[in-house]
Image (cartoon, rainbow, N blue to C red):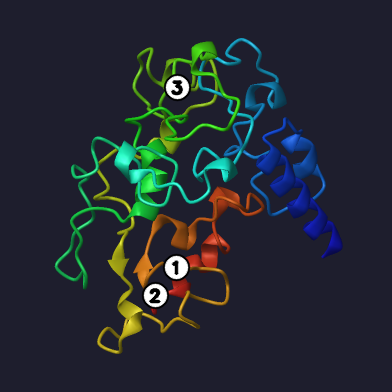
């Protein structure tokens, strides 16, 4: 517990001061952290041994948190007047109202657009916007020094997309991470969880207001991308909140 607290304090202090720190070194001290993982873009190229695209594919802001979260020095700032996703440090995708969501006659609660927390995930993984398209940058970041191409997690072969190189031949294939805007074959998101009432006997009642004891979460009573995926915990494959063989049975009685 003391070690975890020490790591947290070091990270908060570093981010508050805006100083350069070795986040990969912090990650090496413990598990269950985004530091040093694929979602930590600080020093990513150097960690994986790639130098050719350093500072070119995307902007390295020196903080793993600001790619999603409002920087500490902007605490309390609202990103929405600048085109940001409510509560987050990402721009709203231009395709925000153009997602084709899962639909079925048996779906209890149908939605027209993803909630902000799922929109956050899609703002990278729908492949329409660069992974570094943040509303606010950390203090000290100079846009005049930015030489990045702001590449997108997109499986199409063109110079704006990661797949120009990450095609399975030059580098590992990015296509599996490119969800796109057609979500009709994906698990439904942003709908109210059917197990909150006794009307649908196919779903389990949650263990508490925030979800289930195994870590599967509900957000304002809704099922979101982050209900099953935990970006801050790389210890489980595909960032799942529980083992794949028992994850579905957390909610579904089948």
Quadrant of the rendering where the N terminus is positioned:
bottom right
- Neighbourhood count class around disc 1 (C-alpha, 10 Å): few under 14, some 14–19, many 20 upward: some
Residue that lies at the very extreme toward the left in this rendered image: 105
Residue 2 % position (x, y): 85, 62
Q: Which residue is mark 2?
A: 252
Q: Which residue is mark 3?
A: 162
Q: Nearer the viewer, residue 214 or 122?
A: 122
Label pair 1/2, CB-CB below 8 angstroms = yes
Expressed as whole percent of the image width and height from the top left, the position of residue 8 reads 74, 53
Q: Mark 1 or 3 closer to N-term?
A: 3
Residue 228 at what x, y percent from top left? 47, 61
Q: Is residue 92 visible?
A: no
Q: Between marks 1 and 2, how big is the CA–CA gap?
A: 6 Å
SS of the residue at dot 2? loop
Q: Residue furthest right?
A: 2
For discs 2 and 3, the disc positioned in front in the rendered view? 3
Q: Is residue 104 above or below residue 138?
A: below
Q: Residue at x 54, y 49 (%)?
A: 238
Front residue of 211 and 18: 18
Disc 1 versus disc 3: distance between alpha carbons? Answer: 31 Å
Please give the label number shown on residue 248: 1
Q: Secondary structure at mark 3?
A: helix
């Amino acid at each position: 517990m003391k070690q975890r607290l020490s790591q947290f304090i070091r990270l908060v202090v570093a981010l508050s001061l805006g100083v350069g720190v070795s986040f990969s070194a912090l990650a090496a001290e413990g598990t269950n952290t985004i530091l040093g993982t694929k979602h930590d873009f600080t020093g990513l190229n150097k960690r994986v041994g790639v130098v050719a695209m350093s500072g070119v594919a995307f902007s390295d802001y020196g903080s793993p948190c600001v790619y999603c979260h409002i920087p500490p020095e902007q605490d309390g700032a609202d990103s929405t007047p600048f085109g940001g996703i409510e509560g987050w440090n990402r721009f709203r995708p231009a395709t925000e109202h153009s997602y084709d969501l899962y639909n079925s006659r048996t779906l209890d609660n149908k939605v027209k657009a993803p909630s902000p927390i799922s929109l956050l995930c899609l703002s990278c993984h729908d492949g329409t916007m660069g992974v570094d398209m943040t509303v606010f940058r950390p203090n000290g970041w100079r846009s005049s020094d930015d030489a990045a191409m702001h590449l997108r997690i997109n499986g199409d072969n063109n110079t704006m997309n990661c797949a120009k190189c990450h095609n399975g031949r030059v580098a590992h294939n990015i296509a599996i991470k490119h969800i796109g805007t057609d979500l009709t074959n994906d698990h439904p998101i942003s709908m109210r969880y059917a197990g909150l009432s006794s009307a649908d006997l196919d779903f389990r009642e949650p263990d508490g207001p925030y979800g289930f004891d195994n870590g599967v979460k509900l957000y304002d009573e809704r099922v979101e991308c982050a209900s099953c995926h935990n970006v801050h915990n790389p210890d489980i494959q595909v960032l799942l909140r529980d083992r794949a063989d028992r994850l579905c049975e957390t909610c579904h009685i089948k």
